[in-house]
Image (cartoon, grey):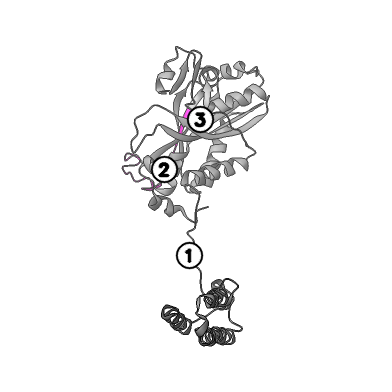
Amino acid sequence: MEQLLQQIESYKTEISAFEASTADAVENFRIKWLGTKGLVKAIMGEMKNVPNDRKKEFGQILNDFKLFAETKFQTLSENNSGLPTNDSELIDWSLPGDPVALGTRHPLSIVRNQIVSIFKRLGFAVAEGPEIEDDWHNFGAMNLPEDHPARDMQDTFYINQDPAWLLRTHTSSVQARVMEKQKPPIRVICPGRVYRNETISARAHCFFHQVEGLYIDENVSFADLKQTLYFFVQEMFGKDTKVRFRPSYFPFTEPSAEMDISCLICGGDGCNVCKHTGWVEILGSGMVHPKVLENFGIDPNKYTGFAFGMGVERICQLKYRVNDLRLYSQNDVRFLKQFTGAL
């Protein structure tokens, strides 16, 4: 019986020390001590083990213990009336919240969207095609037969040699698919990712992004091509940007030209980026070769057209002064954070 008395005293000490700051805590006290499976009821059940000659004595002790627990519960209830019912209500919602990091688009996505937006204002629609392409749409339709030396200019990732399937080397394949399904007038731009088997360095990568354009209609001239690209340069880089065209060679255009703009980094004075010439090449262009039109049943005597293609990485490099192409695909947060808030 002495052990039971010690247990009661231990419980009283625990009850006396208990404090509550919420209504939930008070309810937990009631369940623990006064509930149907509480400790008070459990210890009252010990009366059956008390000898008959001491039942009156222990009955009084147990009743006092029960009254002690009930009094404590009543006091806790009175002291905590009107307080929050749970811990979440103790939060001060007027305090400022934790800062949330602001995300952004990838710089290549920002520039690509700007390019698309500029040409959309000129009436160009957006066309897309598969990145895994067949030899005909990627090469043959673009006036590059199997023995054409221009194929050596593009180190291709072949998936299957016979029949030839490959990762497209340019988005000209999308132009081919558009001409295959649509008759003139055609006015589209073809943004997308392309692949070439090149050594990765600060100036080259095995995958990159292009935006190519195609316009075919009656009486389309080289002057139309020049004015279209003049508009693009002024909208992308500013009204003061100078432009020049240089004769070049592409199998799918004739005549062909590369377009340079005045270096935005040195202002045309000469630097490492422009190789001290004051000019930076940004795209290739030209009038669509009659053979390409014939490949898709378009009469070259009735229709003419122009095409152009630019690398998004190069445009982004000039616009944001990026000096290493590898930064675009390394996912370095320090690099990407610089474009937070960009359009």
What amino acid is found at the position of numbered circle 2 in the picture? Tyr
Q: Is residue 272 magenta?
A: yes
Magenta residue span? 257-276
Apparent side of residue 128 relative to residue 280 in the rendered image (left or right): right
For marks 2 and 3, give the CA distance: 25 Å
Amino acid type, callout 1: Pro
What residue would you read off at disc 2? 328
Q: In terms of image quadrants, where is residue 28?
A: bottom right
Residue that badge 3 annotates? 285
Numbered disc in front, either 2 or 3: 2
Mark with earlier residue (2, 3): 3
User: Please, what is the three-letter code of the amino acid marked with disc 3?
Assistant: Ser
Q: Quadrant of the N terminus?
A: bottom left
Residue 212 highlighted magenta (yes or no) = no
Residue at 55% from the left image edge and 18% from the top image edge: 141
Q: Which class describes the residues within 10 Å of circle 1: few (<14), some (14-19), or many (20+)? A: few
Mark 2 residue crowding within 10 angstroms, few (<14) / some (14–19) / many (20+): some
Q: How far apart are marks 3 and 1 (CA)?
A: 48 Å
Q: Can residue 326 be seen in this view?
A: yes
> Where is 126 relative to 340, above or below?
above
Q: Which residue is nearer to you in this view: 3 or 270?
A: 3
Badge 3 or badge 1: first in the primary sequence: 1
Q: Does residue 17 appear left or right of residue 228 in this picture?
A: left
Q: Main secondary structure of the magenta part?
A: loop
Q: Which secondary structure, mark 3? A: strand
